[in-house]
Amino acid sequence: MLPAMFTSVRVLSDQDDLAIVILLTVMFTEDESDWIYVNPGNYHYHKRAVKTGLRLKNEAAIEEGLEAGERFVVDGALLPRSEKR
């Protein structure tokens, strides 16, 4: 496609399909895997591998490793990582 060109798109998914989408700045990649820090409570943080699906410019859909409603670090994700060393 070139500038000023248009197209039609047909999305093949159910209206009820839901996804967990996070910003790419929340994740970090290490050893060919994507990771986030999850907060199970009481100011504790656990590093958890996640499997991503569709990636957009600034976001990624999470297919495995994070459930709806779970709390995770959204800013400063490298701080818990640096404190472990």
Image (cartoon, rainbow, N blue to C red):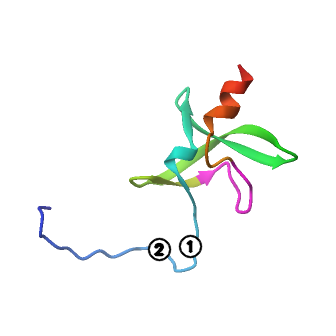
Measured Cα–Cα span from mark 2 to mark 1: 7 Å
Question: Disc 1 on helix, strand or loop?
Answer: loop
Q: Residue at x 62, y 44 (%)?
A: 50
Circle 2 sits on which residue?
A: 13
Report which quarter residue 9 is drawn in: bottom left
Residue 38 in picture, x, y percent from top left: 73, 45
Q: Which residues are magenta?
A: 63-72
Q: Residue at x 67, y 29 (%)?
A: 81
> Dot 2, crowdedness within 10 Å: few (<14), some or many (≥20)?
few
Are the residues at dot 2 and dot 1 in contact (C-beta closer than 8 Å)? yes
User: Is residue 19 on the magenta stretch?
Assistant: no
User: Measured along the vertical axis of the image, is residue 36 above or below residue 55?
Assistant: above
Residue 76 in picture, x, y percent from top left: 62, 40
Report the amino acid beneath label 1.
Asp
Q: Residue at x 50, y 47 (%)?
A: 24
User: Measured along the vertical axis of the image, is residue 13 above or below residue 27?
Assistant: below
Question: How many marks are shown on the rendered structure?
Answer: 2
Say which of 26 and 13 sits in front: 26
Checking the image for residue 17, the label placed there is 1
Q: Quadrant of the N terminus?
A: bottom left
Q: Quadrant of the C terminus?
A: top right
Residue 60 left/right relative to 1:
right
Residue that lies at the very extreme toward the top in this rendered image = 85
Residue that lies at the very extreme toward the bottom in this rendered image = 15
Residue 54 in picture, x, y percent from top left: 46, 55
Say which of 74 and 50 sits in front: 74
Q: Residue at x 47, y 74 (%)?
A: 13
Residue 36 left/right relative to 22:
right
Name the dominant secondary structure of the magenta segment: loop
Residue 14 left/right relative to 5:
right
